[in-house]
Image (cartoon, coloured by chain):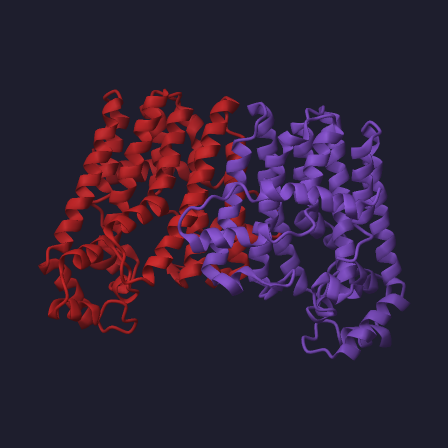
Chain colours: A red, B purple
């Protein structure tokens, strides 16, 4: 299975539903702002995983589409608010929400997408007891997401982020929403409790691998493909898995001094960034991060054992592998 | 019934529950920020109305307390984001969230409170079908609230807000959350559809009267009691019921010029504000606004006819009257 082609095909199928829940209400500037991010595309990994989880446990994928849309709206709501908090002006090549619509409308567009997600969950065509379970895990996921984002902000200003803190942060800011979506898809598909738990575990582990690889891309990715300025994470002093590893293994000394002279230096020259990159590679921190990501990917795939063999199990396995083998 | 004393008593009883849903999680700065507004008090009209509506239809008020807390959290989430959007630095005498915690944490604290509200709704101790109805109306309310806030922002920059636009704006930004809470309380109390509808109508009308009176207080209230700088709404050029009426009835001419010279003038002197105030009174726009607020209050009270006579019906009637007869 070529997972990129399969993912693209499934993402395209979700485009219609994603565009169908926001009607032409007033005021038009807010409505336009709520549509900007979700309509702009993206990999659509989260919504595709919701539908796939539902099918993988033997359910009717159609029934999971509204939850897939809700999870995508929540993801986009967090992106809008993140871009504002970080002061980022570009995303996927387009101007960010607060740049186009101004700060107040960007805040409201995020809030509105979040609200719409819960309206959609309320209307899920499943028994109300199951809807309640989906609601609970989605609500908790967004609470955790906010905690993860705050930890991320706190970490940026801290020189002493442990590997444990780093992993807890990315579990909260990335994995929990994957997991709420995948577990929700399994619930909609009628899975038993043990299967739902396994699907949840799959997504939690996969999310960690995904975010670790995202952090690797942030430093070693091709800016033309990632859409992110190379070296930005180093200039911002972002504590990634590689940086945590570097701190854990390299004691005080010339190498540490050389790295710290660049790390967090907002106006670092490209040559300095290159030095920092080289140091992380030569000290084995890059390789360590790749190994860690692979470990989490393998844990994710092991969780799929509970599923019957078939196309959806293969797709979910391929997605987990793709999470740490992509260029964007 | 002295409604202020009764409201205070009931508000105090809700203090414990309002403080019981946010545990000591990490990171502590975000948790602290989520607690700041809801723990600081306020009139607690919305949560008191949720519990009262439940009791008024013959239900067990205890069962409505979680929804009361959820509605109060949502209200506070919108206040945190509003203060940030408006750049307000003080609320109820305290520094606003973004002043204390910074912009990113204020955004996240609002998002987190919103998420917590839905976690609480998911755990309501009522049949899941009823919970679904409560969820739907609450989700829609927040969607509408964002629309109302955006309309309010758009209106501030517009010289041509009609009375119709004004009323639609305050229905969305104020009434819908009152209504979701009150209808939700009635649903939890086991009310039939007709009664739920009537309770919804009560809160929609009461919310309009409440916001109209808030706009009146914004211009004629005692700053020491309202906590808002007098004349601010005039300096900001806020289109209130009085200003809409003024535009509708006073054609071009000297009086209009005199008013418009002050309206929206950010550095207007106190004497100029006094002139604008006097003009709105002398042209009958203040009296008109009071009449309109009274009309909506009466419509709200008429909706209560569906209820059996009793203490809760009296309290809800008194609350509707209090909405337009308060100094804060």
Residue lying at 14% horizontally and 50% vertically, measured from the top left: A288
Is residue B214 in view from this perspective? yes
Tell me the residue at 82%/42% (across/down). Answer: B318
Nearer to me, B326 or A299: B326
Pick the residue in front: A204 or A210.
A204
Q: Nearer the viewer, residue B125 or B297?
A: B125
Task: Identify which residue is drawn at 65% across, 28% down.
Answer: B188
Residue B7 screen position, x and y as percent: 74, 45
Number of marks in the rendered image? 0
Expressed as whole percent of the image width and height from the top left, the position of residue A224 reads 26, 59
Left or right for B36, reference A170: right
Q: In the orientation shown, which residue stands out farthest toward the left?
A: A282
Quadrant of the image containing the N terminus of chain A: top left
* Residue at figure coordinates x 84%, y 29% from the top left: B309
Residue A161 occupies quadrant:
bottom left
Does B172 sit above or below residue B153? above
Compared across the picture, whether B113 is left or right of B45 comes to: left
Location of residue B283 in the rendering, given as x and y in whole percent from the top left corner: 89, 66
Q: Position of residue A128 (x, y in %)?
A: 52, 24
Residue toward you, B235 or B76: B76
On the image, which quarter does residue B189 sit in?
A: top right
Q: In this view of the protein, can residue B253 be seen by the observer?
A: no
Q: Is residue A151 above or below residue A189?
A: below
Q: Is residue A288 above or below residue B279?
A: above
């Amino acid at each position: 299975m070529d997972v990129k082609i399969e993912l693209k095909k499934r993402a395209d199928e979700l485009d219609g539903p994603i565009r169908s829940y926001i009607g032409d209400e007033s005021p038009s500037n807010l409505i336009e702002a709520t549509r900007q991010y979700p309509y702009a595309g993206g990999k659509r990994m989260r919504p595709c995983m919701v539908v796939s989880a539902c099918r993988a446990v033997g359910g009717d994928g159609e029934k999971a589409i509204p939850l897939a849309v809700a999870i995508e709206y929540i993801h986009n709501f967090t992106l809008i608010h993140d871009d504002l908090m970080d002061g980022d002006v570009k995303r996927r090549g387009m101007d960010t929400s607060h740049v186009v619509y101004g700060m107040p409308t960007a805040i409201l567009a995020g809030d509105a997408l979040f609200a719409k997600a819960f309206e959609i969950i309320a209307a899920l065509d499943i028994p109300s007891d199951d809807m309640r379970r989906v609601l609970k895990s989605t609500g908790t996921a967004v609470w955790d997401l906010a905690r993860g984002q705050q930890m991320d902000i706190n970490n940026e200003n801290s020189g002493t982020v442990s590997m444990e803190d780093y992993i807890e942060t990315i579990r909260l800011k990335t994995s929990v929403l994957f997991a709420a979506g995948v577990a929700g898809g399994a619930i909609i598909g009628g899975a038993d409790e043990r299967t739902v738990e396994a699907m949840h575990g799959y997504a939690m582990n996969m999310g960690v691998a995904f975010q670790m690889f995202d952090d690797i891309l942030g430093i070693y990715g091709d800016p033309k493909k990632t859409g992110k300025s190379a070296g930005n994470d180093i200039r911002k002093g972002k504590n990634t898995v590689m940086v945590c590893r570097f701190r854990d293994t390299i004691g005080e000394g010339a190498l540490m001094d050389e790295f710290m002279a660049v790390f967090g230096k907002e106006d670092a020259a490209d040559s300095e960034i290159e030095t920092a990159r080289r140091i992380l590679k030569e000290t084995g921190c890059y390789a360590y991060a790749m190994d860690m990501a692979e470990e989490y990917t393998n844990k994710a795939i092991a969780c799929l054992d509970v599923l019957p063999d078939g196309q959806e199990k293969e797709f979910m396995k391929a997605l987990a592998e793709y999470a740490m083998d992509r260029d964007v």
